[in-house]
Amino acid sequence: MDYSKVILSNGNLPAADDLKIEKQEKGVLVSWDPNGKYNDTVMILLYHPLRKQATPVINACRRDAGAYFVGLNEQLLDEPIEAYICFKSANGKAISDSVYIGNLNGEVESKKEQEQKEKYALVKQQFDAIKADYLKQMADNSGNPVNTKAFRNLEKEYEVLKNKLEHLPVKPG
């Protein structure tokens, strides 16, 4: 999912520039350029994709504060976080568009990406075992292929797994 395209609010109130999110020891610090109506209220949403839960801060502070600290427990702080901000007028009658601040701790892998990585790891493990045996037999025979059916099967399996690894869509790391 492209979290940068999520819209949480839509309105006429100006948003803020120079948005930042910074991980700290006990939470995250969200900051912005405090220009604009000084008494607008800041609203922050931290989304935790692994848990499919959010940490909303509806009345965080006034716009002129320029920053707000959101305390989080250690588990949430170490997981991926998607951060958003918007502003509402002091009288509650106007709101800004929500703005995506960014991601902390990396993006969550989709189920398909996880499955592809697992498949790659399994094929790589098989390949490494076959490769070790193949190279040992080649070395034992001074670099020349061994002329046996068992070796030809080993060599074929080595080539098939090598080709499979080269063409799998996901390579870790």
Image (cartoon, grey):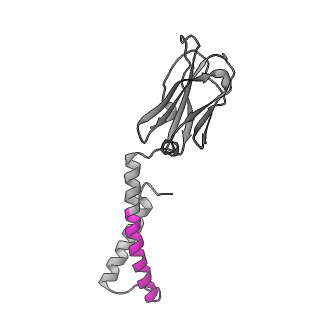
The answer to whether residue 64 of the structure is visible from this angle is: yes
In the foreground, 2 or 66: 66
Magenta residues span 122-145
Main SS of residues in magenta: helix
Residue 21: image location, x then y, percent: 60, 36
Which quadrant does the N terminus fall into? top left
Q: Residue at x 49, y 42 (%)?
A: 76
Q: Is residue 44 above or below residue 77?
A: above
Residue 90 shown left or right of residue 137 in the figure: right
Q: Residue at x 38, y 48 (%)?
A: 112
Q: Residue at x 41, y 45 (%)?
A: 110
Residue 24: image location, x then y, percent: 61, 42
| Residue extending farthest left | 149
Magenta-drawn stretch contains 138: yes
Residue 167 shown left or right of residue 13 in the figure: left
The answer to whether residue 2 of the structure is visible from this angle is: no
Residue 122: image location, x then y, percent: 37, 63
Q: Is residue 98 above or below residue 21?
A: above
